[in-house]
């Protein structure tokens, strides 16, 4: 079977880019990915996948795949745009992977982009994000993204004794990693007290339990495995790619608010394809849109037992030197979360780790890496496993 | 800190709800009469919430409307401190499991976050709420009732 390799990755800094348009950001990320590979020009790109959550509302721009192709200089025999809220990036990777794996194209560019600080006010940006939850059964009553994750937090705290301090450990750890990542949104250190004393956003979650709104773009070049060495000395292979979508979109429909059931299924599929187990993973980037999410993810990915996530984090098992360093790029909490770009940025961070190119202070000696990306209330999940 | 610049007020653009979807319209019309109803499949017995015109399990369209129980218990809860224009924070919200196992999401109108715990008994009540169109519509809410 054809293998699929990543031969180039690129990303913009995440943050507020008041002087950059969505297409500017995409160009910057794509240029970096092309320069990261060897002997690839934009003319060589045969397949183009665009992951973007909301250009229709944020930029008032439809037909995004055509629009971006103009600015990126892409003429492709396979092109599509994917959207699945916050998991759009990994859906894009999976689409690009399928295009290469099927033999449809040999070289596929996957680009994720979101440009949020373009609408006139913060309230408009938040309104744009309320479109991703159910309009009639959730958003209509004043809800937005933190609500569902707060529901998970309340129940996880009740049944497993997970504490606000344990949640804060996640935020502080990921911020510490972000300080070593110049492309991360936040660059100032925070303490446990800063997290605990930050204002409530959706109790029990506080401001520093939540990821920010960010602008940014990330790109990855996927090629047929047998061509990979032509484009880089250090190809990183996609060994497993699992996805699961469960028909529980409204918060009251979720059958279990103490775990990410869809993630257990996506992970099982990815582990099976890659022929590995949780204990074989050396480094992971997970979707910590809220601190509680990282705890639910390390449990569902099998890094620790169900209910033990808070304790596992508190013991430093997800930090450098622990059993499984998680979110060494700063996570969504501190690296930022330009919705469609996140899954692709996660891949870039794992590629950097597996090549041994991560800077000191967040370098892990890793052979096998994993990324996990989610949409909805964790009911749409994707897991990718990579190796050298 | 950059976080702070995200406004505390968010505006959801007006949009009239999907009243033309038959199942949803029927649900909303019943709320106006103080009734809480949903759909049940007559073939396989599955109760759906939100109500639907076809069963998502066996795909039969032999649907009957049933009354939902008005009593339930708190399954999980939260307190929204950042809410759209038209709502006043804080708003206590909960997922409530009704006596027949159906779960609903809405506001808890008479208890703060600190006053709630999992398993607390609540009753369904009806209240006017602002919708996207800035008009008032009757909706179901939860009431904890007198405590202790």
Image: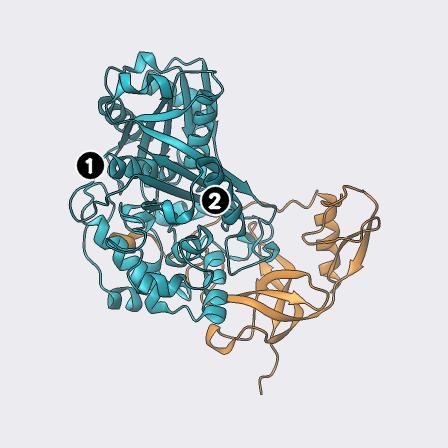
Chain colours: A cyan, B orange
Q: Residues within 10 Å of mark 2 (few under 14, many from 20)?
A: many
Query: Circle 2 is placed at which residue position?
Result: A267
| Residue plotted at (40% across, 46% down) | A124
A124 or A284: nearer the eye? Answer: A284
Give x and y (percent) for residue B34.
73, 65
- Tell me which corner region of the image, top left, top right, bottom left or bottom right, holds residue A75: top left
| Residue A48 in sight from this viewpoint | yes
Q: Dots 2 and 1: beta carbons under 8 Å?
A: no
Lower position in the chain sequence, tag 2 or tag 1 = 2
Q: Residues within 10 Å of mark 1 (few under 14, many from 20)?
A: few
Is label 2 in a helix, a strand or a loop? helix
Give x and y (percent) for residue A13.
24, 38
Give x and y (percent) for residue B125.
66, 69
Q: What chain does badge 1 belong to?
A: A
| Residue A52 in sight from this viewpoint | no
Question: Among all residues in the image, which is located at the extreme bottom?
Answer: B148
| The C terminus of chain A lies in quadrant | top left
Question: Among all residues in the image, which is located at the extreme left?
Answer: A360
> For residue A124, which numbered disc appears in the image?
none
Q: Is residue A247 above or below residue A295?
A: above
Give x and y (percent) for residue A319.
27, 55
A280 or A312: nearer the eye? Answer: A280
A242 or A131: nearer the eye? Answer: A242
| Residue plotted at (74% across, 44% down) | B22
Query: Circle 1 is placed at which residue position?
Result: A357
A167 or B29: nearer the eye? Answer: A167
C-alpha distance separating marks 2 and 1: 26 Å
Q: Is residue B94 left or right of residue A173?
A: right
Q: Is residue B84 above or below residue A8?
A: below
Is label 1 in a helix, a strand or a loop? loop
Q: Is residue A290 above or below residue A233?
A: below
Q: What chain does badge 2 belong to?
A: A
């Amino acid at each position: 079977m054809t293998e699929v390799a990543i031969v180039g990755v690129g990303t913009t800094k995440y943050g507020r880019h008041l002087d950059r348009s969505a297409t500017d950001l995409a160009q910057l990320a794509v240029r970096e990915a092309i320069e990261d590979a060897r002997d690839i020009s934009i003319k060589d790109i045969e397949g183009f996948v665009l992951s973007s959550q909301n250009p229709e509302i944020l930029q008032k721009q439809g037909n995004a795949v055509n629009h971006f192709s103009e600015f990126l200089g892409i003429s492709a025999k396979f092109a599509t745009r994917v959207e699945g809220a916050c998991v759009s990036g990994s859906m894009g990777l999976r689409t690009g992977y399928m295009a290469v794996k099927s033999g449809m194209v040999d070289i596929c560019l996957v680009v994720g982009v979101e440009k949020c600080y373009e609408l006139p006010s913060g309230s408009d940006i938040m309104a744009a994000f309320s479109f991703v939850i159910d309009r009639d059964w959730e958003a209509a009553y004043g809800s937005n993204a933190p609500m569902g994750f707060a529901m998970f937090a309340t129940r996880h705290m009740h049944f497993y004794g997970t504490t606000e301090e344990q949640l804060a450990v996640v935020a502080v750890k990921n911020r510490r990693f972000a300080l070593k990542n110049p492309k991360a949104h936040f660059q100032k250190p925070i303490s446990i007290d800063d997290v605990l004393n930050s204002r409530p956003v959706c109790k029990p979650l506080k401001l520093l339990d939540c990821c920010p709104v960010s602008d940014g773009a990330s790109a990855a070049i996927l090629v047929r495995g047998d061509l990979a060495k032509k484009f880089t000395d250090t190809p990183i292979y996609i060994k497993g790619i699992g996805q699961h979508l469960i028909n529980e979109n409204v918060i009251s429909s979720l059958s279990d608010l103490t775990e990410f059931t869809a993630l257990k299924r996506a992970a099982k599929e990815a582990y099976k394809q890659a022929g590995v187990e949780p204990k074989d993973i050396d480094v992971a980037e997970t979707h910590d849109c809220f601190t509680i999410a990282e705890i639910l993810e390390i449990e569902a990915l099998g890094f620790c037992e169900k209910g033990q996530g808070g304790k596992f984090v508190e013991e430093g098992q997800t930090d450098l030197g622990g059993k499984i360093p998680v979110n060494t790029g700063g996570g969504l909490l501190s690296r930022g979360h330009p919705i469609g770009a996140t899954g692709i940025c996660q891949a870039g961070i794992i590629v950097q780790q597996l090549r041994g190119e991560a800077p000191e202070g967040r370098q892990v000696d890793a052979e096998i890496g994993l990324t996990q990306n989610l949409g909805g209330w964790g009911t749409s999940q994707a897991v990718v496993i990579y190796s050298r | 800190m950059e976080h702070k610049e995200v406004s505390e007020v968010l505006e959801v653009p007006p949009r009239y709800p999907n009243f033309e979807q038959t199942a949803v319209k029927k649900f909303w019309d019943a709320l106006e009469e103080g009734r809480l109803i949903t759909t049940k499949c007559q073939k396989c017995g599955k109760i759906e919430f939100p109500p639907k015109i076809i069963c998502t399990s066996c795909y039969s369209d032999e649907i009957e409307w049933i009354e939902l129980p008005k009593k339930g218990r708190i399954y999980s809860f939260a307190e929204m401190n950042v809410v759209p224009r038209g709502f006043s924070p804080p708003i206590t919200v909960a997922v409530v499991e009704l006596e027949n196992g159906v779960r609903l999401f809405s506001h808890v109108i008479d208890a703060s976050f600190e006053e709630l715990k999992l398993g607390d008994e609540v009753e369904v009540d009806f209240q006017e709420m602002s919708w996207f169109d800035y008009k008032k519509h009757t909706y179901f809410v939860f009431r904890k009732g007198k405590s202790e």
